[in-house]
Every structure is written in C-alpha cells, then in structure tokens.
Image: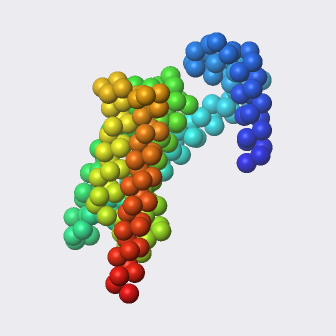
Amino acid sequence: ALLIILPTAFIGMYGAINYAGETTRDFLSNALLFDQADTVGALAIIGLFAAVLSTTNAQIFALGSELRSILRGKEKKVMVWAKIGIFVFAVITLIFSTYMSDKLVLLARTSFTGTSMMAPVVIVGVLSKEAPGKELFIVSITALFLFLISLFNIIPGEYYGFLIETILYAVLVITTALSLIIRKTKLQKSL
C-alpha cells in the first residue's frame, strides 16, 4: 500500500503546486500523464481504470448480495429479482460512465459515494443477527436516489454550506444507530 500511496501523494502535491488554478481535467492530464515519464503515466491510467472497474465490481456484488438477503420467497424468484436489480444498476452505471467519460477519477469518487449510501444495510447486516429491515433499505435507496438526482442538478447539491452527501451521511448514521438500538432492545426483551 505504501508503494502506491507515496508516489500518488507526491504526484498530487506536484500537481497542486504547478496546476493549482487549472480545471480538474487539465490538472489530472498534466500531473498524471504529460509531466511524468511514460511508464508512470501508463501506470496511472492503468490504476485509474482498475479503480473504476474495482468500484463497479464491488457495487454490483454488494447490490446483488443485499438484494438477495432482503428479498423473500423461493430461491429462483429471488435470483430473478436480484438479476433484474443488477441489470438496472448496470444500465445506470453505463449512463454515468458515458456521461462522465473524461472524468474517471470523479467517476470513481462518485461511485464510491453512491456505494457508501448502502452502508447502513451492510453495517446492520454485519452487526446484527437478523437481516437488515426494510426501513434501512428504503432509507439507503432514498439517499442514493437523492444523491444521484443532485448529480444531474435536479435538486441542489449543497444546502446551507453542506454538500448533500454530508447531509445524507448524517441521516444514514442516525438511522443506522436507531435501527441497531431498536434491534438490541428487542433482543434484550426477548431474552
């Protein structure tokens, strides 16, 4: 990890000094590609693509796992709905990657932010003996939806000086904490 993080930090500091007023596109292309040795530039591009593919793969895997754990019914029917959910997600990902083709780093950051909106479902699934409740799934999907429409400027991306994802994270943390407390209280009452 140190071999990856240190050179990246040095390249980032170099770019921050030499391209402070540039657009993100110019900053990244100059700092990562044109001002570096060809080998370093190639490794940077490979790393960016690997980050994007890794994030997408993780999102699809997490979505499929969570959909399967929430859906009830026969295994065959659950698998069909999980596959439909993954397909819809893949189409959304395709649209975003096409829309943001010149902003790979921003795409990776955006996809990570979108994925993290599902964190309450994963956290409760790990910390609780029961499957996450529908309320967490609804709150997470709503947060993800609000984040996505803020990317298209349908709703503002900032409120009172706070980015919408910061506000959504606060709501998700509170909802997750309440869900864990309620589950723990129910578990103690049943014992």
Could you tell me how many numbered marks the image carries?
0
Residue 37 location in percent, x, y? 77, 23
Q: Is residue 21 left or right of residue 191?
A: right
The residue at 73%/41% (across/down) is 5
**Residue 86 in sight in this render:** no
Farthest residue, direction top: 21
Judged left or right of residue 54, residue 181 is left
Residue at image coords 48%, 51%: 58
Using the rendered image of the protein, determine whether residue 50 is visible from the camera's viewpoint: yes
Q: Is residue 139 above or below residue 111?
A: below
**Who's the residue at 29% across and 52% down the image?**
138
Q: Is residue 110 shown above or below 27?
A: below
Measuring from the top left, give residue 108's x and y in whole percent.
Answer: 52, 36
Q: Position of residue 21 (x, y in %)?
A: 64, 12
Residue at the spot 36% in from the left edge and 30% down from the top edge: 150
* Colour approach in the figure: rainbow
Q: Return the x and y of residue 89 as percentages of the image width and height.
A: 34, 44
Residue 47: which quarter of the image? top right
Depth order, front residue of 3/159: 159
Residue toward you, 191 or 33: 191
Quarter that holds the C terminus: bottom left
